[in-house]
Image: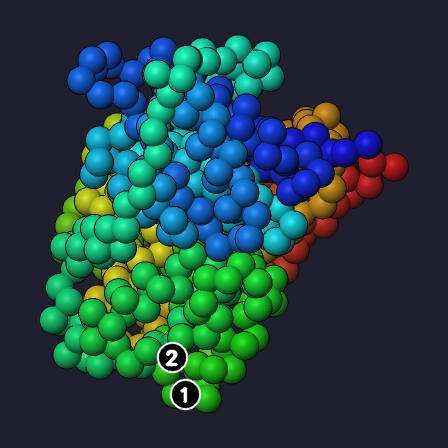
Amino acid sequence: MAPELIITISGLRGLVGVNLTASVATEYGCAFGTYLKRNCPNDASRRPAVCIGTDSRPSGVMLKAAIAQGLNSVGIDVVDLGIVTTPSVGIMLRHLGCAGGIVVTASHNPIEYNGIKLLLANGIAPPAATAGQIKALFLDKQFDLVGLADRGQAACNDLTDDIHLDRVLSIIEPEVIARRKFKVVLDSVNGAGGPIGAKLLKKLGCELTAINSEPTGDFAHTPEPIKENLGGLCSEVRQSKADVGFAQDPDADRIAIVDENGEFIGEEFTLALAAKHIFASQSGMAAANLSTSRMIDDIAENGGGRVIRTAVGEANVANAMVQNNCIIGGEGNGGVIDLRVGPIRDSLVAMGLVLELMADTGKTVSELVAETGGYDMQKTKFAATKDQSQQIIDRAAKLFKDAKVDTTDGCRFDFDDGWLHIRSSNTEPIMRIIVETRDVRISQGYIDKVAEIRKEILA
C-alpha cells in the first residue's frame, strides 16, 4: 500500500509516481485556486494570478504543468518562473501583485520525493486554519471549476534573478565586500540556487569556485547541507585556500558554512552570524523557533534586543517577525529571514550578511565562531508515530517536572544548565530531539534519558 501524502501548513510532499502523481498535483492546484478565488479581494479588471517556480528536480516539470492545469481550470492565471529558488517565488509574487505562489520542491529530501509548497499574497505559507481549509477542499474535491471562456491563462517571466538580486544588494554594501576580494566556494548540490548564487557572489567581487552548480536535479551528494554530506566542499575550501565555503540546499532557502580551514561550523551558526552583523548596528526584536540555539539570545541581548520564540516552521517565524517588526529572524537549520528582502528563509541574504560581517570586522569565519559560540548542541531523531511521540513527551514531562516547560510545539524543557526540545516532525513520521548545554556530557545525559523513555514506549 502506498504511503499517505504528507500535508502540512506549507503544502504537501510525497513520492513521485507513488502517492504524488500528476492527477494529485492538478487537484491540489484546483484546491488552492478555489481557496484563492473565494478569499481574494474582487478585482473585475483581472483574474487572480499565481506564480509557480520549481527547484531542479526532473519531476518538477511534470508537476508544474499539472498544477498549472488545475489553477487554470478554476479561473486562475499562472506565471511560470522556471527553475528558481524558493525565496525568489516569494519575492516575485509580491512584485507582480499575485494572489499566491507555489514552489515545486521537496527541499532537502532525496530526489525520489517532491512537494508543492504554498505561499499566500504576503509571501508566507498559510496559517494553520487556512491550510486546513485548503486541505479540506483538496480531500473533498470541492473545486470551483469554470467554463472555457473563463479559464486562466499561462505566461512566463524571466526577470526573477534580477529582481531578487536587487533586493539582496539593497540591504548590504557591495563595495565594502568587494574590496576584500574574498575567495568563496559555493556548493549548490545541482539545485536551483547555483546560477543566482554565482551571480550574487560575482556582484560582490568574490573570487568564486562553484561546485555542483548546474541545476540538473542530479544531486551530487545527499542534499541536506549537514556535516556528513559536505566533505567535498570542505576539501575544496582547503585546496583553494578559500575564505569561506557555502552549501545551499536544493531550493536555496538556507545555507551551511565551512570556515577558512575547511571545517564545517554547524548550521546553527548561519543565523547566529547573520544576527551578529545586524545587531552590531541596530537594536530591536529577533525571532527564532524553539529548536534554535540560544546564541541568538546572547547576540540580541548584547545588542539591546530580545528574541521571540515560536513553534518550528518558517511560517511561524515569519509571522512573528511581521507582527513584531523584527530586524532579523530564522531557524537553526541555516535559514535566515530579513523582512527587507522578504518573509522567507533566503540563502542569498545569509551569504550577503555573513560576507559583510567578515568585511566589516576583518575577522575570519573561525574567529567569528570562536567569539560567538560556547554551547554544545546535539540533534538526533528516530522513527515514531504521532501517538508514540505524544506518549514520550508526556513521560518526559513527568521526569523533568522541575524544568520550565513550553508546549507551543512538542515540549521544550529549560533547565539551569541548558534546554531540551522534543517534538514530532511536521513532514515525516519521526521524532526529533534537540539539546543544548555548555558541556557535551550534560547534553548526552539528557539524550540518554529520552532514549530510556523511548525504549519503554516503543518496546
- Kindly identify which numbered label has been placed on residue 209: 2
Work out which residue is located at the far right of the displayed protein and give it.
Answer: 459
> What residue is rendered at 34% in x and 29% in y?
153
One can see residue 248 in this view? yes
The one nearer the camera, 456 or 102, is 102
- Kindly identify which numbered label has been placed on residue 45: none
Three-letter amino acid code of the residue under disc 2: Thr
For this view, does 452 lie left or right of residue 73? right
Q: State whether residue 337 is above or below residue 9.
A: below
Mark 1 or mark 2: whose residue is earlier in sequence: 2
Query: Residue 174 at what x, y percent from top left?
Result: 15, 67
> What residue is rendered at 64% in x and 42% in y?
16
Query: Residue 317 at what x, y percent from top left?
Result: 37, 36
Q: State whether residue 44 is above or below residue 268.
A: above
Q: In the picture, residue 258 is in which quadrant?
A: bottom left
Three-letter amino acid code of the residue under disc 1: Ser
